Image: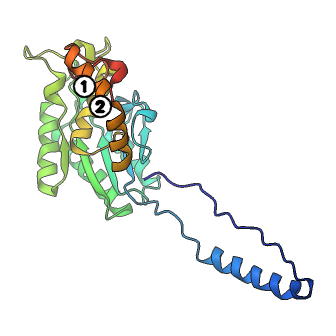
Amino acid sequence: MEKSNENIEYRNVNIINNSNTASTSKALDQSQTKRKNFQTFPDDRKDKTLIIGSSIIKGIDASKIGKDVDIRTNRGATVPILTEKIRKSNIQHYTSIILVVGGNDASSRIQPEAFRQNYEFMIKTVRSINPSIDITISEICPRRNVNTDVYNTILHRISAELNFKIIKQTDVFVSRGGDLVSTYYHRNGIHLTNQGTIQLLRNINRVVNIFIRTNSSQSNNENNEQHGKRQSIVNTFNGICFNCGFYGHHYKDCHTF
């Protein structure tokens, strides 16, 4: 939930009876002090999510995801580097964390067993700082310079053993012919284009809700106001949205992302 910066406002009280000014002022001060002492603050831990990883997440536009979701990009980070970043960070106020790292480790041709040990140590580090946090791990997105399958197999094994949710990335980034989907990658075959980043986020959102959230009344009002327009678009347009990748609406009318 969005952290509120709203300040409590107190009404100014005009004292009419001069003879009771002192006692009334004293009572007012006591009342205000009491109200300040019992002032409630928002729970920073309520539905707060952290997405942390290497430069694979650098293209995420924070304005397009929920305000209760924070992004921390660490360019060039390997699992040990990210572990150290986490160790020095304050993650105690998050209820969930999404780990998106491992591509640079794979590119360095690290031994699978060493990769497993490093990743498990990173998870232990997270747990030592915030024992109650929900951990979700992401598959390594396919790369042109290395086969990531062996490392993703390890991540699936870790998620099964520790009962963590895992975000699948491989299938949608590889074509039926076995090549990388060119529109999702820059020429280096490593970093994601805007479309690739959108796909990455869609994959994450299938497991953990990270898109902008609205309450039910707001959602119902918006749906009622836009129902006729959107229904007309669906009925008259059969192309693909360049924003979310779904068919049936223009990107200008996209409300998925």
Which residue in the protein does label 1 denote? 231
| Residue 95 appears in the picture as rendered | yes
> In screen coordinates, is 82 left or right of 172?
right
In which quadrant of the rendered view does residue 37 lie?
A: bottom right
Q: Where's residue 136, x and y in %?
A: 25, 48
Q: How many marks?
A: 2
Q: Farthest left residue?
A: 177
Q: Is residue 141 above or below residue 240?
A: below
Q: Nearer the viewer, residue 254 or 88?
A: 254
Q: Locate residue 233, reporting x and y percent.
A: 27, 19
Q: Are marks 1 and 2 in contact (CB under 8 Å)?
A: yes
Task: Determine whether the residue tagged by mark 2 lies in a helix, strand or loop.
Answer: helix
Colour style of the rendered protein structure: rainbow
Identify the residue at image location x=64%, y=76%: 35
Separation of disc 1 and disc 2 at Cα?
Answer: 6 Å
Task: Pick whichever, 139 or 248, lies toward us.
Answer: 248
Residue drawn where x is 32% and y is 65% of the image: 131
Q: Is residue 191 above or below residue 165?
A: above
Mark 1: give few (<14), some (14-19) or many (20+) Cα within 10 Å: few
Disc 1 on helix, strand or loop?
A: helix
* Location of residue 92 with respect to 207 vertically, above or below: below
Left or right placement of residue 210 versus residue 161 in this view? right
**Mark 1 residue type:** Gln
Who's the residue at 42% across and 31% down the image? 75
- Image point (34%, 23%), residue name: 253
Report the amino acid beneath label 2: His
Q: Is residue 32 left or right of residue 102?
A: right
Q: Identify the residue under disc 2.
A: 227
Residue at the right extreme, as displayed: 18
